[in-house]
């Protein structure tokens, strides 16, 4: 194929990527935006396949078929609750692919590359490997294949610094020497660095790390664009790197935490981490009928949904309860914390899945002034986002803005057990005299409340 | 292509990247992250190029692994983002009170 046509197709793809990101920023255009992105990517791949008469074309197409066969069922079947870890995994393999591309290009032409291209190569190998192993750990944490709490061992800080210095040192050494062994060592040390980088990040902060690693992968793709002198990779990677960095900052500020605090918080404050154990202090529990009475005689109810709601697949039952309350003339709204669920905006996705009307969802700033005039707050499967410990210094969630449910007249928690939330710290609010608890699976409990309310 | 041109493209793309997402609403943080994640799957283009030029078995094997991984990133990323956004679609509820745009 004529080189000019290839470059023109790349230009079209790059424009489609820009339109995709733009579209994804607004609810009306988001779906179209994503399709534009997919179209751009498909165009770029097809044009590349036929750009030259490649050796191994059959094997390459076979690889694409295998990759699609793996990815499509995963993406289609994943429960919306587990979607954050899938995004982490997809991001990780992208970082791994970028690192491999840089390594292969180095093996092929390493000796003749310019200093600039070699610098881009070592950057890609380093950051791509960090992104790969970091994302795998993130996946394991969210999938609960390992503890979601920060993992810190004695001297870890020094090992991490040593790995970071080692990786940078190896990267610098590769450029003048172009030794294959050093590149392999760089890859291995960077993989270790990625693990050390994510291990100390705890629970609720993990999504921010996904976003950061996403930006990292974008930058590695941009760097491989330098290495291969491919403008499309350069533009697409840079777009993702820049927008991902901004998105990470937006997410962190939604949680009221500086990024440095999230990444290095566990190193500096290791001793303040919660026990993660269930407490045996006395709490007031109540029956589903009691909950139905409290709700039935309220004027204003705020629902605070959390990840536990989604795990129990109880969104539909919750909507049924809210519809019932509305029909009795009770004012009901949902208070959505920015990080309710496992990622910013995750709860909106989950509630949209249950066709909850959009206008009942109130963001934190809108709903917080409402609590002082609220009769009953129903907290369903949420914990950390209403934990007043966030207002005190020295806890893993210190500084995170919370929903001020403690200002309401009474609070009802639907909880499975007394186990602490994702952040692993106890919630004093559970022991407040205004608080009552209904234990059990969220869907089960909500169904019983709905039945009791209908019987009233 | 000379380094200076590539650097120019790089710097301008940074500004575009910041600009296009600067007004994103909180509810779309997750789909936007996922969509951006899919876009960097275009590293598949790089994986195809290095595999196509591979001369040794080692290069070919590593290149093909990169092809598979990049495809998973790209295809899976777009599909999962579409599924997320599909949920936002049936928002016909405000029809009775929302003013016409």
Image (spheres, rainbow, N blue to C red):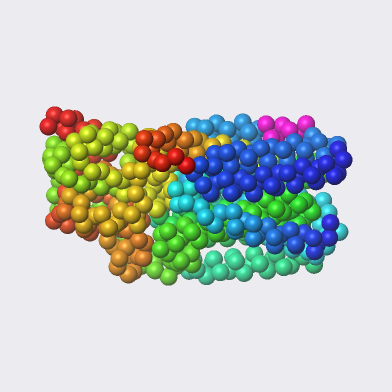
Q: Tell whether position A60 is magenta.
A: yes
What residue occupies the far front of the structure in this picture? B100
Which stretch appears magenta? Answer: A58-65
Q: Is residue A443 visible?
A: no
The vertical placement of A126 against A97, above or below, is below
Q: Position of residue A243 (x, y in %)?
A: 58, 56
The vertical placement of A110 against B84, above or below, is below
Q: Position of residue B67 (x, y in %)?
A: 70, 41
Q: Position of residue A182 (x, y in %)?
A: 73, 61
Seen at 72% across and 32% down, the residue is: A62
SS assignment for the magenta stretch, majority: helix
Q: How many marks?
A: 0
Q: Tell whether position A149 is magenta.
A: no
Where the N terminus of chain B falls, by quadrant? bottom right
Q: In front here: A151 or A105? A: A105
> Would you say A416 lies left or right of B53 here?
left
Seen at 44% across and 48% down, the residue is: B27
């Amino acid at each position: 194929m004529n080189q000019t046509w290839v470059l023109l197709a790349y230009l079209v793809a790059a424009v489609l990527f820009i339109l995709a990101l733009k579209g994804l920023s607004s609810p009306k255009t988001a779906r179209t935006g994503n399709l534009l992105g997919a179209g751009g990517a498909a165009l770029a791949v097809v044009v590349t396949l036929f750009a030259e008469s490649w050796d191994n074309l059959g094997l390459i197409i076979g690889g694409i078929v295998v990759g699609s066969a793996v990815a499509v069922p995963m993406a289609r079947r994943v429960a919306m609750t587990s979607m954050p870890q899938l995004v982490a995994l997809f991001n990780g393999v992208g970082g791994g692919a970028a690192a491999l591309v840089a390594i292969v290009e180095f093996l092929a032409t390493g000796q003749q590359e310019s200093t600039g291209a070699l610098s881009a190569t070592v950057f890609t190998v380093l950051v791509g490997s960090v992104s790969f192993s970091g994302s795998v750990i993130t996946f394991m944490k969210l999938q609960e294949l390992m503890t979601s709490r920060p993992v810190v061992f004695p001297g870890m800080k020094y090992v991490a610094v040593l790995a970071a210095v080692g990786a940078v040192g190896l990267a610098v050494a590769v450029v003048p020497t172009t030794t294959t062994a050093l590149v392999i060592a760089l890859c291995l040390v960077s993989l270790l660095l990625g693990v050390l980088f994510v291990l100390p990040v705890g629970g609720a902060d993990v999504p921010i790390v996904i976003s950061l690693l996403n930006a990292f992968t974008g930058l590695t793709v941009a760097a491989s664009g330098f290495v291969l002198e491919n403008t499309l990779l350069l533009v697409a990677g840079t777009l993702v790197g820049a927008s991902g960095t901004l998105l990470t900052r937006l997410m962190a500020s939604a949680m009221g935490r500086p990024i440095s605090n999230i990444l290095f918080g566990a190193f500096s404050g290791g001793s303040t981490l919660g026990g993660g154990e269930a407490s045996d202090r006395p709490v007031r529990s109540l029956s589903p009928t009691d909950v139905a009475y409290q709700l039935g005689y309220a004027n204003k109810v705020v629902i605070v949904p959390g990840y536990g709601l989604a795990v129990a697949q109880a969104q539909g039952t919750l909507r049924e309860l809210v519809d019932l309350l509305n029909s009795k003339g009770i004012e009901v709204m949902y208070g959505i914390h920015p990080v309710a669920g496992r990622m910013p905006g995750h709860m909106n996705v989950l509630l949209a899945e249950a066709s909850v009307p959009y206008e009942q969802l109130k963001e934190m700033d809108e709903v917080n002034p409402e609590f002082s005039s609220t009769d009953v707050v129903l907290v369903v499967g949420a914990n950390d986002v209403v934990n007043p410990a966030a207002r005190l210094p020295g806890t893993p969630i210190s500084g995170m803005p919370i929903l001020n449910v403690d200002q309401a007249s009474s609070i009802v928690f639907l909880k499975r057990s007394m186990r602490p939330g994702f952040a692993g710290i106890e919630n004093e609010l559970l022991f407040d005299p205004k608080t009552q608890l209904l234990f059990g699976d969220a869907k089960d409990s909500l169904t019983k409340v709905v039945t009791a309310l209908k019987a009233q | 292509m000379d380094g200076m041109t590539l650097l120019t493209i790089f710097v301008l793309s940074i500004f575009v990247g910041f600009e296009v997402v600067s007004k994103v609403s909180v509810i779309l943080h997750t789909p936007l992250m996922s969509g951006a994640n899919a876009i960097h799957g275009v590293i598949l283009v790089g994986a195809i190029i290095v595999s196509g030029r591979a001369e040794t078995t080692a290069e070919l094997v590593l290149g093909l692994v990169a092809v598979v991984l990049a495809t998973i990133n790209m295809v899976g990323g777009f599909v999962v983002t579409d599924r997320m956004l599909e949920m936002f679609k049936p928002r016909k509820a405000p029809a009775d009170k929302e003013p016409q745009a």
